[in-house]
Image (tube, grey):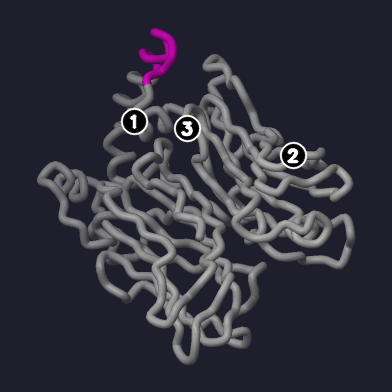
Amino acid sequence: MSPAYIDCKKTQYCPESLAECQNIPTVPVGGVRFASYTDWSPRIVEVRRLVTSPGTACETTVSVDGFKHGMSFHNEADAIHDTVYAEPTKVLAKNSLELSMNTITGGGETNLHARWNLTIRDPTIADKIVMGIPLSDNEEAIAQKYELHDMHEMGTLPQHKNLLGDDVVTLFDEVIEVARRLPTVAAGGELIVGGVKNIPTSANKVFVLLGVAFDTAALKTAAGIGLDDTFIKIDRDAMTEYMVLDAATMPGFVSTDAFHLDDTVRMYMPALEKFAVRITTTTGFTAANNLRLRYIYGVRKLTVIDHIKWGLTPRTTAAIARATELDEKHSLTERVAAGVIGVL
């Protein structure tokens, strides 16, 4: 079984929504935990778009903060949708998260797939009020100043955006799709498919990876490659393998068109220096297998609010002076902390 690769503590540019795609080779009688996350304080984590392949007698459970009350569903073919479409589920966790499968009747199951996103956020004061997290004296004073308790009761607090939805494109000046037909990659080999490298600081831009799609059906049929063999790996800035996706567990075929790529695994991964999309394979494949991969990313301006949220220092003396002027004039740091501006 592939491990859960996401490390919530390594997120730098919150909010981020990172994807997991993995195979669960065996679900024995008594069940198996296939992902576990903890120690991400002070951040909060959402489980989004969880989907599993149908079995005959399994149940998937999401346990949050030490309790099995997050979400559960039967993996029967007539009880869940399919392995392509993920319902827009959302489960919140403050300090721990576990995903597990358990057999309900009979023997075990083999080679079940699971895909999900973790959306990681730095909680605002408004978030803490909604989730019942105690406020410090300073936070309470800000909450009173901006009437956050009243707004919570009235239902008028600013809402977070769905980072995995189609309307996320409205956040960007440009949204760019890149599609590649893959050449031969030898057994044990690796290929850098694409990405963006050497983003100059002077560009003052944020590049956000929004999704990756792969020719999963052709991987299994034309190349004859199965599970736990070929992986799509995402590097971000100085971090390698920031995300690792088992290619054979990505969404199934969604069209009879022979030239149709499989559905996109959505994500929201900002980068300030570079990002790369790589593929590694144990078995190897050839150009004749006609494997294809695509990815999509958005580009927008790096703002003063980004600098405040991410703890960045503007690159020039003039930029520092301007950011300070805007912060003092509009109380940006305080309003960002409150959760009344800059909410994503």
**Crowding at mark 3 (Cα within 10 Å: few <14, some 14-19, many 20+):** few
Please give the name of the residue rendered at 67% of the width and 36% of the height, measured from the top-left corner: 190
Q: Which residue is mark 3?
A: 239
- Sequence-first disc among 1 and 3: 3
Vertically, is 231 above or below 33? above
Q: Which residue is mark 2?
A: 186
Q: Helix or strand or loop: what does disc 1 sit on?
A: helix
Q: Is residue 200 magenta?
A: no
* Residue 94 relative to residue 181: left or right: left
Q: 163 or 41: which is nearer to us?
A: 41
Q: Which mark is residue 330?
A: 1
Report the amino acid beneath label 2: Ala
The front one of 91 and 32 is: 32
The residue at 33%/26% (across/down) is 327
Contact? badges 1 and 3 (CB < 8 Å): no
Judged from the image, the secondary structure of the residue bearing numbered disc 2 is: loop
Residue found at x 30% / y 48%:
40
Q: Residue 13 appears at what percent x and percent y? A: 43, 37
Q: Decide which of tag 2 and tag 3 comes sooner along the chain.
A: 2
From the viewer's perspective, is residue 261 above or below residue 172? below
Q: Among all residues in the image, which is located at the extreme bottom?
A: 105
The quarter holding residue 318 reads top left
Residue extending farthest to the top is 317
Instruction: Give the residue type that dot 3 points to.
Output: Met
